[in-house]
Amino acid sequence: MKDFPLIFQIARTHLLSRVKQTIVAMLGVTFGISLFIGMVGLMTGLNDFTEELAMTSTPHIHIYNDVAVDRKTILDSSNPDGFNVVHHQKPKDEKQNLKDAFQIVRVIQQDKRVLGVAPSVATQVFYNYGPVQLNGSVLGVDILAEDQMFDLRDKLRSGTLEDLLNTNDGLIMGVGLARKLNVQTGDRVTITTPQGYTMKLRVVGTFQMGMGAIDDVRSYANITTVQKIMQKDNQYVTDINVKLKDQSESEALAVIYQRLFGYRSVGWEEANATLIIGNIFRNILTYTVSITLLTVAGFGIYNILNMAIYNKMKDIAILKAMGFSAQDVTQIFLTQSIIIGLLGSLAGLVLGYLLAYGISKVPFDAGDVVNLTSLPVNFSITYYIIGIVFGMLTTAMAGYLPARKAGKVDPIEILRG
């Protein structure tokens, strides 16, 4: 078996003797890896962006009173073993508040896994401003606790959180809702509840979450203000939102809290199941297309090496006549494949980074629907490592069969012609 430096030198000479073929093979790997990096960077960037948007509006754990539709009747209580049928059962006016809500908040705050807890009161309202009337909601919160959980201060487009704290009739309104109502900071709007209660409130600020489903319907008010709107006492709370130090613990803790407090507790993953499934499908599609591109590049290398072996038959015969074994000849052509893969992969990493960088600079204006000025791209080093490893494996596998074929060439038959 010959020394590797000699094998490498012969492989390099073969590649340089047919520069165009070598470049074409390298470009197949280069474009495959660059497109992989560009696509996976864009798709995972979009996934991260949508997940971040969901995180800004969805707590890790949401605790609320899940009003049951099926309820036991008097017959069920008096005759539990019988077959009871009640037609046209009159709906029961069940309260949606959480009993001892502030005590629940204090218990949750003692949990070392919890970063923040925010009680809230939500109510549906009609916003009236002149001839305009829109359906929406008002969320009564402790605005500082809400800021700790969802970083509201950075999402304000006008006004301050302190402006809301210092007034009993203030609203911080979503920018989409404010635009539809044509109101600005300082204007007054009239809200009406489904029960008919009417109250005038002053817009003290606007916010933008970046999600039209929130920015077009929601306003924040002090929790006491919403309790007054709903004509409830100061202990009335409908929801408790929890933010954890580790998001991955949300599902397990939600089960514990539901069993402990007796109210419905929903973890982040359950609340955003559709988003998570969509991200998984997009990742599968991205990796499938990318792997297909690299596989096609591998077939290109396979064909080029096959042609190189056919054109180098006499050289192979001479090498074997000089004492090169079948294993040596196989290593020469396999080394050529690895060199093509390495150079093509490195060039693909550079071109892929430039492609991803160019995509990240493309301006994107989604208006009030999403707070986005350019396309989000993920520059994680993981995808660059995956790209070069897969590129090297593809070219090595594509070059193995032609290299093995070269090692089996019979020099006597070639030299006889």
Image (tube, rainbow, N blue to C red):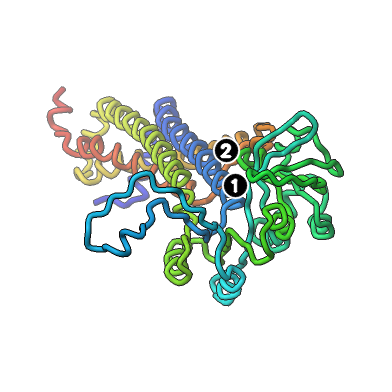
Closer to the camera, 288 or 322?
Answer: 288
Give how far across and how far down residue 45 sits, in percent: 55, 43
Secondary-structure class at tag 2: helix
Name the amino acid, label 2: Ala
- Which residue is depicted at the point 75% across and 54% down? 153
| Residue designated by label 1 | 53
Q: Compared with residue 111, is residue 40 higher up or lower down, i.e. above or below?
A: above
Q: What residue is shown with label 2? A: 356
In this image, 395 relative to 44: left or right? left
Q: Nearer the viewer, residue 272 or 81?
A: 81
Quadrant location of the C terminus? top left
- Dividing the picture into quadrants, the one containing residue 211 is top right
Q: Is residue 152 left or right of residue 252?
A: right
| Location of residue 289 in the rendering, given as x and y in whole percent from the top left corner | 39, 33
Query: Is residue 177 rendered to the left or right of residue 95?
Result: right
The answer to whether residue 8 is visible is yes
Q: Secondary structure at mark 1?
A: helix
| Residue 124 % position (x, y) | 63, 45
- Residue occupying image coordinates x 23% and y 55%: 83
Q: Earlier in the sequence, mark 2 or mark 1?
A: 1
Category of crowding for the residue at label 1, using alpha-carbon neighbours closer than 10 angstroms: few (below 14), some (14–19), many (at least 20): some
